Amino acid sequence: MTQVALITGAARGIGLASAQVFHENGYQVILLDRDQDALEAAIADFPQAVPLLFDIADPQAGGLIAAQIKDKFGRLDCLVNNAGVADFGPIETCDQTAWRRIMETNLDGMFYLTQSLTPLLKEARGSIVNIASISGLRASTLRVAYGTSKAAVIHLTKQQAVELGEYGIRVNAVAPGPVRTKLAMAVHTQDIIDAYHDAIPLNRYGSERELGEVIYFLCSDKASYVTGQVLAVDGGFEATGVGLPALRQ
């Protein structure tokens, strides 16, 4: 029977690249996103995938998503919690609205969706990959809400791994470093790009495909004894200490 993978925030970027890797490995892929235009564009280029238009920040969405997947496929083998939002700015300007907007998607939505899908994952002894961020492992400028939400995702991953392991469900997190997405390239100035290159031992941004390959690996049977782990896919960025780029010259 064909295995089924659900990927959230899948209309573009890391989510879409991951979906393509799963498809190449024989999975039926479900693309979930709240952006209807982007989702329709993704499906036009990737017609083998099944679209689901939902906003996981809606607390009622999880149950509806679980019901649709059960009715259409009868199973769920992999869940990639990739959907997330960011809002960068100083601590002083992060008001309640901005804080809750980040948490409602990055943390609350991830938790409630996973909770709703747990019965299906139990039946399949499936796997979950939560997308955190390097900003959840190390503090970063102007990212108080985003970084805090991703740090919480890392601990949520460990809680889920400990509690769901008895059902054979594995749960891991991927913490991407700087990735060459269209959005990043649109907002990163050359000075920012140069600064990242200086701080990353591999001297470059990652690609969406590179993230997708790692996400697939953690969901696959090749990672069958890996759970509760956080894997930084960041070119060595998180491992870097103070960093003195001038010494490399």
Image (cartoon, grey):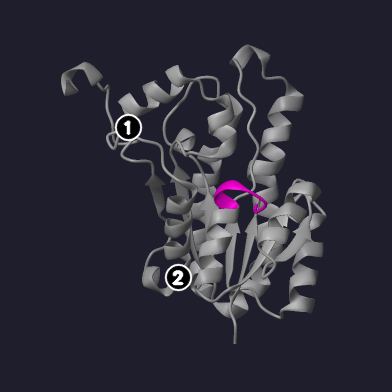
Extreme bottom residue here?
A: 1
Disc 2: which residue: 220
- Crowd tier of the residue under label 1, counting other residues whose Cα lies within 10 Å: few below 14, some 14–19, many 20 or above: many
Image depth: mark 2 or mark 1 in front:
1
**Residue linked to disc 1:** 200
Q: Secondary structure at mark 2?
A: loop
Rendered residue at 75%/76% (across/down)? 70
Above or below residue 219? Residue 85 is above
Asked if residue 175 lies left or right of residue 35, the reply is left
Range of residues picked out in magenta: 10-15
Query: Rounded to the nearest whole Å, what is the CA distance between mark 2 and mark 1?
Result: 28 Å
Query: Is 139 displayed left or right of 243 in the figure?
Result: right
* Amino acid tagged 1: Ile
- Of label 2 and label 1, which has the lower sequence position? 1
When the figure is inspected, residue 23 is found, relative to residue 199, above or below; the finding is: below
Q: Quadrant of the N terminus?
A: bottom right
